[in-house]
Amino acid sequence: MIYFSIMKINVPKWLYEIAEINSQPLYLVGGYVRNALCGLPPSDVDVAGVAMPEDLILPKGYYFATTYKRMGTALIKHRYLHGAEAEYTPFRTEEYAPGGAHTPTKVCFNASVEEDARRRDFTVNSIYYDIKKDEIIDFFGGVEDAKNKILRAYDPEKVFASDGLRLLRLIRISAQTGFTIDPETERVAKASAHLLADITMARKSLELQKILFADLAFDVIDAHYRGLTLLRDYGFLPYVCPELADLDGLAQPAKYHKYDALEHTFRVVRSAPPSIRLAALFHDIGKAPCMKHDGNMHEHDVVGAKMLEKILSEEGLRLSTKEIDRTIRLVRNHMYDKERQTKSGKMLIFVAKNFDIIDDLSELMDADSLGKGTVLTAEPNRLKEFRDILVQSGAPIRQCDLHISGVDLISLGYEGEEIGKELNRLYETCVLNPSLNNHKKLLELSKRGKINRKTE
């Protein structure tokens, strides 16, 4: 059914300028229209039309930042106007090979608006808004679905078979918007989980990360938690991260935990601030292999940190080296001083050596505590307490804050690995005794250390 309606949507003034100087109609489509109809904040601006990008006329100051010729898409930006940015796509049809791979095997342009609508994923993303006429065109009941906050594929069998990545988009968009998923779309999606096997890890990683921050997209409360639970409930998790799926149903000691290991993990993510959600998602990843090999979960922090070297690498979720290192350190240390029995000196040295992540580590410990389901407030940890003690003492926070260098040690006869070991010894000494961080005193300490080692 075709639905035409004169309906005013708040269109940015700069977008009207582009539409006005082109003879062919330009249409807003996708999330921007969807969100306008259901009262959510604006999404990215997607525009479609008959013309190829090279045939579009752009007002002064606008330019094509990038063009993906095979798909015909182009990113339109303004040189000076912040926020004036839209992705333009000409009407097209697509053909895909069997198996649900994300990349189409054939793309044809000069399609009609209805043909273009049929290639899109969900009805709420297939609503076209004629910018000049302030007119909505809706072929599949997307307007009604948007108003009722329902996510539905007009032909779910075809939608998911064409592109398996749409299974993850279903979860992510449902989480971000708070839309419920149409029962028939849900049924077909669950039956199509195997199509995710044909999707590259790079694509799946991007969707997983968007789900982790789904609540930030349109301010939908707990969207990230709901997205993760949908991944589990739809059977998609084994295709995204099988190591996480192994936590599903893994019982934990009832004295400390109300939930199994996977539900606990999701609730830790739910409580975690955005900066540590990746670490929260993987903090207990080592529990399943520990139970399998040892019959208990001891050392799961160590095992989990080792596992992440592969899970987050190029062959896995493909994160940056910096993010991988930070996440591994958080996971490796999230059990530190759990019993609050570590001696003060050791605590100070630990906090100093991990000062760059100490606030995040404290937040992770708090979220881990809340995620157990057995407490209403986080069990106290001592990290911030010792961070404050360290800062107030004036101790060197980093090794480079020492008032002595490797060059000084070389002049005293140190060489090779001795230099690093001695700098570390001096650093730990000054963390515990800040008044010793003096060039003259450190030289004297190093001289004595050199003599003592020779006489041993």
Image (cartoon, rainbow, N blue to C red):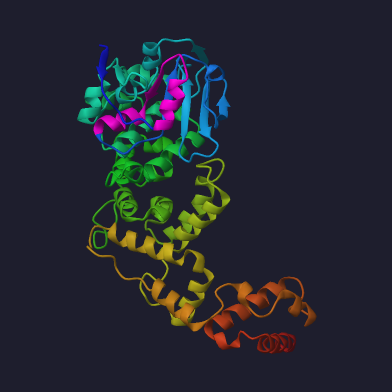
Q: Looking at the image, which residue is at 40% across and 37% down?
A: 238
> Within the image, what quadrant is residue 437 found in?
bottom right
> Within the image, what quadrant is residue 123 found in?
top left
Side of 447 relative to 433 (left or right) = right
Give yes or no for residue 32 being in the magenta stretch: yes
Side of 28 relative to 441 (left or right) = left
Vertical arrangement, residue 131 with respect to residue 177, above or below? above
Give yes or no for residue 288 being in the magenta stretch: no
Depth check, front residue: 53 or 252? 53
Vertical arrangement, residue 231 with respect to residue 345, above or below? above
Expressed as whole percent of the image width and height from the top left, the position of residue 320 reads: 55, 48
Depth check, front residue: 123 or 282? 123
Q: Looking at the image, which residue is at 41% across and 26% down?
A: 16
Vertical arrangement, residue 325 with respect to residue 121, above or below? below
Segment colored magenta: 13-38
Expressed as whole percent of the image width and height from the top left, the position of residue 428 reads: 57, 79
Question: Is any part of residue 178 visible from this angle?
Answer: yes
Expressed as whole percent of the image width and height from the top left, the position of residue 368 reads: 33, 59
Depth check, front residue: 29 or 402? 29
Question: Is any part of residue 293 visible from this angle?
Answer: no
Q: Looking at the image, which residue is at 46% across and 81% down?
A: 392
Q: Looking at the image, which residue is at 25% across and 35% down?
A: 39
Depth check, front residue: 3 or 336? 3
Majority secondary structure in the magenta region: helix
Residue lying furthest left: 148
Split into 4 quadrants, where in the image is the N terminus? top left
Expressed as whole percent of the image width and height from the top left, the position of residue 2 reads: 27, 12
> Within the image, what quadrant is residue 412 found in?
bottom right
Split into 4 quadrants, where in the image is the C terminus? bottom right
Badge count: 0
